Image: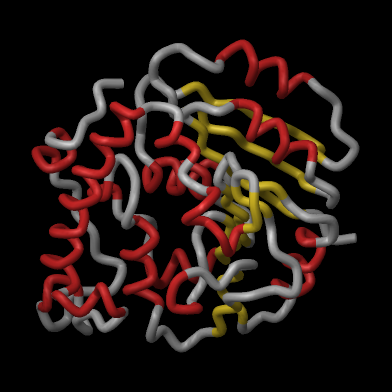
Amino acid sequence: MNSIPVIGVPIVNGFHWLQRLVDSVDYAVDNFVIFNNNGRGELVEELDNLAKQPHQFIKKMTVCHLPSNMGVAGVFNLIIKSYVMAPYWIIANHDIAFVPGLLEEMVEVAKDPETGMIHPNAGDYEIGSYDLFLIKDWVVQNYGLFDENLYPAYCEDADYIMRVFNAPFKKVSKLSKIHFHGNGPANEYYLHGGQTKKTSPELNERLDKINEMNFDYLTSKWGVGWRKVNPWKYPTNRVGVPISYTTYDLKFVRSKHLGF
């Protein structure tokens, strides 16, 4: 059996969801890494205890307690960079759960050398949801890491969709098995997803405003057509700018800081 090199997960709150995710792993995994994105000293004991629990399928579990919230894109990138020699990475939200056989199906589909990304759930526009996905090393090499200007959350997936939408490689956006997200199936995300926001009304309000700011950023990067998956050919509409192009606008990121 070919083991999965890496499964990476960011978490801010809702430890019970993460416990459910770990319990649902039913396929050999070399490295299961958790990035504690809480930034307030919470979850430390629970996560450290989780890492000590023996698991039938997980060879090594690592917990990284970050000093502050690095954002979703930031942690996606840390997962990739922390296991830079991996041929691919599976990245998951903390509040999803694998159904039996899903991880095995992802591994089997990934054996196709022409397939660069795998999404069990088709999501909006039938092009793949980023609550659970597999990305290969050559995709990162050619199309870049995730854009950390989209701190702390939301739209990091939309930006990557713009980059790879017309890319000449195979993207599998639906599998025969679908995972859970929150209390329901992943294809009902708008009913059951968003657990991080649901735990705090104040955080929810702040993230809604940040979402609008990130929408404006994507419009400046990809044009008004991005909302309908019709982006400019080049980022910022400048001919010759590589598709992997990102910057890091410190002032913009600071304007969205959550305080932890």
Relative to residue 191, is residue 167 depicted above or below?
Answer: below
The answer to which quarter of the image holds residue 228 is bottom left
Q: Is residue 168 left or right of residue 61?
A: left
Name the spot of residue 173 as percent of width and height, x first: 57, 76
Q: Nearer the viewer, residue 20 or 47?
A: 20
| Left or right relative to 78: residue 6 | right
Q: How is the image coloured?
A: secondary structure
Q: Quadrant of the C terminus?
A: top left
**Looking at the picture, does residue 254 appear above or below residue 212?**
above
Residue drawn at the location 19% of the way across and 43% of the way down: 209
Residue found 74% across the figure and 37% down from its top: 22
Decide: is 115 above or below 119. Answer: below
The number of numbered discs placed on residues in the rendered structure image is: 0
Q: Is residue 95 above or below residue 184?
A: above
Residues 32 and 226: in front is 226
Identity of the residue furthest to the front in this view: 191
Residue depicted at x 69% and y 73%: 175
Q: Residue at x 78, y 55 (%)?
A: 99
Residue 137, picture quadrant? bottom right
Q: Position of residue 216 (x, y in %)?
A: 13, 59
- How far from the left and from the top, in percent, is residue 155? 32, 57
Residue 147, x across and y down, in percent: 30, 54
- Comparing 42 with 199, the one in front is 199
